[in-house]
Image (cartoon, grey):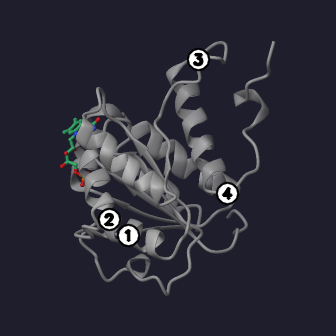
Amino acid sequence: MTPSLGAPVVVGITGASGAALARATVDALLDLGAPVIASASSASRLVWQQELDESFGAALERWADSGLFTFYPPTQLNASIASGSFATRGMAIVPCSMATVAAVAHGLADNLIRRAADVCIKEKRPLVLAPRETPLSAIHLENMASLARLGVTILPPAPPFYLRDLTVDRIVDYVAHRVIVALGLADTMPEKLRYAGP
Ligand SMILES: Cc1cc2nc3c(=O)[nH]c(=O)nc-3n(C[C@H](O)[C@H](O)[C@H](O)COP(=O)(O)O)c2cc1C
């Protein structure tokens, strides 16, 4: 069992492409020793099934083995993370669908992921969204701009083209660590994923 790092981090997994980003983010947080409370939308499960060989159930079992992991279904609106009185270190939604971006931008707290994000905004806790869509419409951009003005970090899973030997695994790893830095859980990116200059 990994030693624990204080209050938990919330991870929301929604139905945008990029299930590997969700998996890598939870893996990296648990590796850091951060307790994780996660929820995953029904759409995210469809995407996961399409994109990854490891089943979602197998990942849940693997994460539970850390002793640091709690999972709630998105319908469980009475879970701890739905209340601002429950302390967390913030939340990442990875990947974040445009539906969830729109809901959070408009305060539509109609599932546990959206409610937990709403709580982070009202409690002024770190909230990091990794929105995945292309191209982006004016609706998407306006919703993201509203959230950015509230202090939400909009962190698109953009490849670090400046790194050599770029593979999908490395891009996924890079985004997961960017999320961790944006949450304030690490000061810098690992050296292997950092721009080194000429
Ligand atoms: C295989 C698959 C891939 C999808 N990819 C995206 C995507 O990249 N970005 C996006 O915004 N929505 C995508 N969607 C649509 C969302 O899943 C859909 O809007 C859903 O209602 C989002 O709900 P959620 O935010 O609660 O997960 C995808 C759906 C499926 C089934």
The three-letter amino acid code for the residue at tag 3 is Phe
Quadrant that contains the C terminus: top right
The three-letter amino acid code for the residue at tag 1 is Asp
- Residue 161 quadrant: top right
Which residue in the structure is indicated by mark 1? 118
Q: How crowded is mark 1: few (under 14 residues within 10 Å), some or many (20 or more)?
A: many
Q: Does the residue labelled 2 lie within 8 Å of ligand 1?
A: yes
Proximity of marks 3 and 2: CB atoms separated by less than 8 Å:
no
Which residue in the structure is indicated by mark 3? 161
Image coordinates of residue 119 in percent, x first then y, are 42, 74
- Please tell me which of labels 1 and 3 falls first in the chain: 1
Which residue in the structure is indicated by mark 4? 184
171 left or right, relative to 57: right
Quadrant that contains the N terminus: bottom right
The residue that appears at 46% across and 52% down in the rendered structure is 148
The three-letter amino acid code for the residue at tag 4 is Gly
Which residue in the structure is indicated by mark 2? 114
